[in-house]
Image: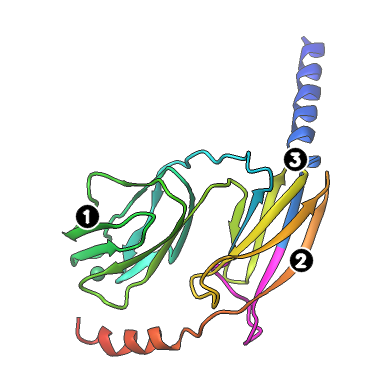
Amino acid sequence: MKHMKFNSLLLLALFWCGQTVWAASIDIMVYDEVSGQPLPYTIVSLHDTSGQQKASAMPLQVMDQVNKTFVPHVLPITVGTLVSFPNSDDIRHHLYSFDKPKPFELPLYEGTPTNPITFDRTGVVRLGCNIHDWMRGYIYILDTPLFAMSNADGALKIENIPAGDYYMEVWHPRIKTRKPLVSKLNLSENEAKVSMLKVNVRKERKLKKRLRSRRDGY
Ligand SMILES: [Cu+2]
């Protein structure tokens, strides 16, 4: 009995090593190139250069509406993932997107619509509300499971990356190029890469101004 316990522990340890120790990881600090401030909501994704890598759909994701704001502001998902759009406010919202990966509309509603929406194509889906013009949300649909979004401190981490060659894509809702920035990246086994990234983004000012002027009216 004792032996068996020891063996299974050993097996567990070996399995754990295989899963995490030999794989690479990257830690990135993201900054606004102009202001030098940490930049949240930056999504970094790694795409296998062989093009063989496939991402499976994630469990149901949630894009909530709280105090007339999309929560989260930016939602990165893999292709095929279902997203529900609950409304936590006690007023009605009317969501829409005109963007190619998934044009859709959820006419005036309270609570949670019964059918979540499947995002089956890669790209950016910008969300808006017909009633509250200033509401802006983003769903970023990826064909790789290797991605992360920078937090309020501008930090992000991608772990368990198999060694190999990748295209690294960087995207932000206000990125000046509008398209993701692409660079090549090689990761060797067990590598723990630490780096810094500066992203050129449009200023937020305009949206805030509009937000202030409109808020009083509703
Ligand atoms: Cu609304």
As drawn, is 165 to the left or to the right of 68?
right
Q: What kind of element bears circle 1? A: loop
- Position of the N terminus, as image quadrant, is top right
Q: List x then y, in percent, for residue 206.
A: 40, 88
Q: What kind of element bears circle 3? A: helix
The residue carrying pointer 1 sits among few (fewer than 14), some (14 to 19) or many (20 or more) residues within 10 Å by Cα, namely: some
Q: List x then y, in percent, for residue 122.
A: 47, 52
As drawn, is 13 to the left or to the right of 68?
right
- Position of the C terminus, as image quadrant, is bottom left
In magenta stretch: residue 6 = no
The quarter of the picture where residue 214 lies is bottom left
Residue highlighted by disc 3: 20
* Magenta residues, dominant SS class: loop
Spatial distance from mark 2 to mark 1, Cα to Cα?
42 Å
- The residue drawn where x is 23% and y is 58% is 105
Residue stretch in magenta: 28-42
Residue furthest to the top: 1
- The residue drawn where x is 40% and y is 44% is 60
Residue highlighted by disc 1: 111
Residue highlighted by disc 2: 195
Spatial distance from mark 1 to mark 3, Cα to Cα?
41 Å
In magenta stretch: residue 38 = yes
Counting residues from the start of the chain, the first of labels 2 and 1 encountered is 1
User: Label 2 is placed on what type of residue?
Assistant: Ser
User: Label 3 is placed on what type of residue?
Assistant: Thr
Q: List x then y, in percent, for residue 141.
A: 47, 53
Mark 2 in CB contact with mark 1 (< 8 angstroms): no
- Closer to the camera, 11 or 85? 85
When the figure is inspected, residue 217 is found, relative to residue 150, above or below; the finding is below
User: Label 1 is placed on what type of residue?
Assistant: Gly
- Closer to the camera, 77 or 7? 77
